[in-house]
Amino acid sequence: MERVTRRQVIGSVGLALGAGLVAGRVSPAFAKTEGPGREVPWPYRQLDPEVVAERGYHGYYKKHCMYGMFSAVVGELADRFGAPYQNFPMDMMEYGAGGVAGWATLCGALNGAAASIYLLSPSPKPVIDELFSWYTVSELPEYRPKNAKFDIVPSVAGSPLCHVSVGRWCEVSGFSSFSKQRSERCAWLTANVAKKTVELLNAQAQGKFAPVHPIPKEIQECRGCHGKGGEVENTRGKMSCTQCHQQEPEDHPVPFKKT
Amino acid sequence: MERVTRRQVIGSVGLALGAGLVAGRVSPAFAKTEGPGREVPWPYRQLDPEVVAERGYHGYYKKHCMYGMFSAVVGELADRFGAPYQNFPMDMMEYGAGGVAGWATLCGALNGAAASIYLLSPSPKPVIDELFSWYTVSELPEYRPKNAKFDIVPSVAGSPLCHVSVGRWCEVSGFSSFSKQRSERCAWLTANVAKKTVELLNAQAQGKFAPVHPIPKEIQECRGCHGKGGEVENTRGKMSCTQCHQQEPEDHPVPFKKT
């Protein structure tokens, strides 16, 4: 892991400003970081992915996944650069815990990541797409925190949803969804998502952002009929279709390909 | 609809403070509203649900569902009371659009509602539970904005997820998920969720919050084995089980009851 130097960090402000101008999403905060900070994006300054990952791990044990992820990135910016980052009411991000107050909807690490990306990126959507796609198809966690409590086996979530992500890991690991090991797994995952988010934001700030996780072919096939411009056009989204639509409708013209 | 008077609004600050003390989640912001606003919860002051609903409707057409919902509540507080509400970088909440950047995960109106509830409530979890449960089982939208563009038929989402909520409405209405009517439906829904959120927060501030939408029996039955303390203990969450688990595993001891 290459360390990001202070010089690189300072240099990145100019790059971020450039990227912002290209994308047409530039706020006064870019020119005046001591400003009130109401406008977004706030300037992103390159961070060390490992430092942020470790913050994510420890943040998880303070106020869970979404807070862990969001405070890893925005808290690190706050500690290094002060305002406007330090003025964010960070603790509100506890709301995303367990897929929002335990509802197991969207993975809290992803919810916090998307929030931080919109707060900090001049062109947030492609970064979120890449992050969510990576999360969905990768064996995670792949980052081991320095003071890990247990060994954690990785699994492929196949989904950005908390319930599916946790359920798949329980299947693979054999642990209960209420075990200490499952908490530790989500702490690792929070660290991992924080690390990846910062890697993507750093790449974007350097003008080197290049997504490598497109929407899988199976989903694109479904979207051919069910998505925008298709015959049926009754669905939105980029999640796996067959993960929930397990039964093939009798009159469905093309056989399902299970992902 | 009973209008909330200025006097009631001012009176509610004291009540909110009292509720905060009871719940043990009191921040310096309660005592000093001109403070930096880093700590949560920020003081909630009772709002007019209809005024907030209308803001939600118009906010949807500015930056979509999550922004529409969040800015309806926090923007109304900002316009009436200034700091700390006015300092929030509201535009970041665009991230939740279409279930986060179009991924169709968590409904953006609910994501924005949960965020605002954690920011403002001294005891946020029961309010989120009640809101999400109400959203899942109710015929929505039930609130008609004053300058509606179309007539919108209601539907029951059965889920807090964007994909399911939109898909069910497309089924009931016959409209495409990319139609102007679908956008209008989501604008009404944003207004409706904003109205309900404020009604629940007002009730809590008055010490009258009483949830009436428990987790449905069918889900509780599944949780008996799959949830905390059950034999299998392999799942978390409060969403419908059979909506996605459509096929009964061959060795499942009790028949599925489809919701």
Image (cartoon, coloured by chain):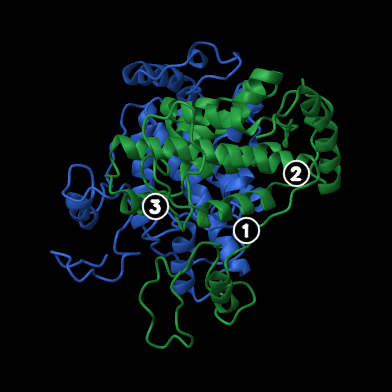
Chain colours: A blue, B green
Q: Amino acid at mark 2?
A: Gln
Q: Amino acid at mark 1?
A: His
**Cα separation between marks 1 and 2:** 16 Å
Report the disc number at residue B204. Answer: 2
Name which residue lies at 36% across and 21% down: A19
| Mark 2–mark 3 CB contact (< 8 Å) | no
Q: Nearer the viewer, residue A71 or B15?
A: B15
Looking at the rendered image, the quarter that the N terminus of chain A falls into is: top left
Percent position of residue B142, x then y: 50, 44
Q: Which residue is mark 1?
A: B213
Residue extending furthest toward the left: A253
| Neighbourhood count class around disc 3 (C-alpha, 10 Å): few under 14, some 14–19, many 20 upward | many
Looking at the rendered image, the quarter that the C terminus of chain A falls into is: bottom left
Q: Which residue is mark 3?
A: A135
Figure check: A152 above or below B196: below
Does residue A48 appear anywhere in the picture?
Answer: no
